Image (cartoon, rainbow, N blue to C red):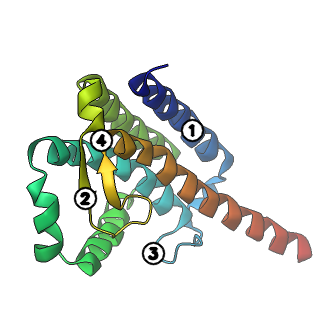
């Protein structure tokens, strides 16, 4: 299987895993704090749809304006990035419910597929240096590695959600 086909399979599997995770989270848990102090479980589920959504812009940056990634840390400090990430997630998730979360992830998924299909194998090998703002996406990043971020980002936050739900269930069992 070529790298593009592997990425496509991984992205499709991640979408299925997102829906399985979403189906496993009780509605009442959406407002429960997650292990990430910035967000509730529902907000974290919404945040998982943001990475694929913004990736389309990242692909364009790598392929058309890679110099901006060198300039970005100089004009846009890391703390502002994290502050905006937290606020935009909370704002975007303000009216969340199960169907909204599913729809938002699926819309982002469709944008990613469209972008991936528009690229050739050479594009996937193009790389630039990313700021060290996110340990899952830092250093020398190729377009292929960027697409792999969808799974890494999902896996990281899915583990947070599952750990939070497990701890909650354990606490309720002791009560």
**Which of these two is toward me, 138 or 95?**
138
Mark 2 or mark 1, which is nearer to you?
A: 2
Is residue 32 shown to the viewer in this render? yes
Q: Earlier in the sequence, mark 2 or mark 4?
A: 2
Left or right: 170 as drawn, with respect to 125: right
Identify the residue under disc 1.
Answer: 19
User: For mark 4, does the 10 Å Cα neighbourhood hold few (<14), some (14 to 19), or many (20 or more) residues?
Assistant: many
Q: What's the CA distance linking mark 3 and mark 2? A: 27 Å
Vertical comparison of 46 with 144: above or below: below
The quarter of the picture where the C terminus appears is: bottom right
Q: Secondary structure at mark 1?
A: helix
Q: Pick out the residue farthest to the right.
A: 174
Q: Position of residue 41 (x, y in %)?
A: 55, 63
Q: What's the CA distance linking mark 4 and mark 1? A: 25 Å
Left or right: 172 as drawn, with respect to 56: right
Q: What's the CA distance linking mark 2 and mark 1? A: 32 Å
Identify the residue under disc 4.
Answer: 143
Q: What's the CA distance linking mark 3 and mark 4? A: 28 Å
Q: Position of residue 1 (x, y in %)?
A: 50, 19
Identify the residue under disc 2.
Answer: 129
Q: What's the CA distance linking mark 1 and mark 3? A: 23 Å
Vertical comparison of 71 with 118: above or below: below
């Amino acid at each position: 299987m070529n790298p593009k086909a592997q990425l496509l399979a991984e992205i499709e599997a991640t979408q299925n895993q997102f829906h399985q995770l979403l189906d496993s989270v009780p509605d009442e848990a959406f407002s429960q704090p997650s292990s990430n102090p910035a967000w509730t479980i529902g907000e974290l589920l919404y945040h998982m749809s943001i990475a694929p959504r913004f990736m389309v812009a990242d692909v364009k940056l790598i392929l058309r304006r890679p110099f901006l990634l060198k300039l970005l840390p100089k004009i846009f400090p890391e703390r502002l990035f994290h502050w905006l990430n937290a606020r935009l997630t909370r704002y975007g998730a303000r009216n969340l419910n199960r169907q909204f979360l599913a729809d938002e992830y699926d819309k982002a998924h469709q944008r990613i597929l469209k972008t991936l299909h528009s690229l050739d194998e050479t594009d996937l090998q193009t790389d630039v240096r990313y700021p060290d703002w996110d340990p899952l996406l830092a250093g020398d990043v190729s377009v292929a590695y960027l697409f792999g971020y969808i799974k890494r980002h999902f896996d990281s936050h899915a583990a947070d959600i599952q750990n939070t739900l497990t701890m909650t269930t354990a606490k309720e069992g002791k009560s």
